[in-house]
Amino acid sequence: MFLTVVKALSLGFMKSLEIFGLTLLGAIPLGLLISLASMNRFKPLSGLTKIIVWIVRGTPLMLQLLIIYYGPGIMLGNNWWGTGSSGRFIAAMVAFILNYACYFSEIFRGGIEGVPKGQREAGQVLGMTNTQIFFRVTLMQVIKRIVPPMGNEIITLVKDTSLVRVIAVYEIMWEGQSFIKSSGIIWPLFFTGVYYLLFSGLLTVLLGKLEKKLDYFRV
């Protein structure tokens, strides 16, 4: 039984890792774009962006999962995602990427606005373009500033992957819970915590090392 449980939980954890990796891959660049849009001088764009961020950050991720997956079929009569596992997974990824991009955007915005204006002006004096100033001056300092808050959100993402079970995406929590129904045992559910703890611990160590490597760049 133990090997059966470990195999099932390992397969579920691989799905959780896939959700985790794809979310970061999509949410980090999208978050940067959203932050730039929210700071844009074109008021309609920045205003609309801020409203979207406020809505996404102010509502539960579980609610967003349910609305994004079931909403098109119920409200528009057209289920964009389909009824198969691939459709559920795509809907889950859309919800996760949008949710975390909005959180990341606020972290990026705080980091960008925290860079002294004088450094951007110095770049202009040296003849650098706005693009060169952003990538060579601003962004390098932003990365240093945002590592701690981004690390907190990344650790939270590890645990939030369990929410996808509400739309029947079979991740590690689903697998652990299934043993209660099939075999009447609860210990596999507690055992899922070991996976989360080990992975969160590994990420904490890696993020700590990254923060130390960036110590040379004082801001």
Image: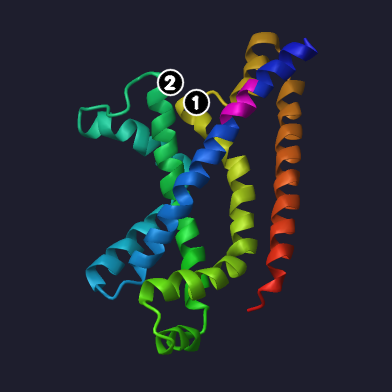
Residue at the right extreme, as displayed? 2
Q: Which sits in the foreground, 195 or 17?
A: 17
Mark 2 highlights which residue?
Answer: 85
Q: CA distance from mark 1 to mark 2?
A: 7 Å
The answer, for residue 209, to whether it is visible in the render is: yes
Location of residue 41 by image quarter = bottom left
Task: Name the residue rendered at 71%, 63% in the picture.
Answer: 213
Magenta highlight range: 11-15
The x and y percentages for residue 187 are 77, 22
Location of residue 129 by image quarter = bottom left
Which numbered disc, 1 or 2, marks the residue that appears first in the sequence?
2
Task: Name the residue rendered at 27%, 29% in the picture.
Answer: 80
- The three-letter code of the residue at mark 2 reads Ser
Task: Name the residue rendered at 49%, 43% in the picture.
Answer: 23
- From what the image shows, is residue 96 above or below residue 72? below
- From what the image shows, is residue 116 above or below residue 87? below
Along the horizontal axis of the image, is 43 left or right of 156? left
Asked if marks 1 and 2 touch (Cβ < 8 Å), the reply is yes
Mark 1 highlights which residue?
Answer: 169
Q: Which sits in the foreground, 198 or 56?
A: 198
The x and y percentages for residue 144 are 61, 68
The x and y percentages for residue 52 are 34, 57
Quadrant placement of the C terminus:
bottom right
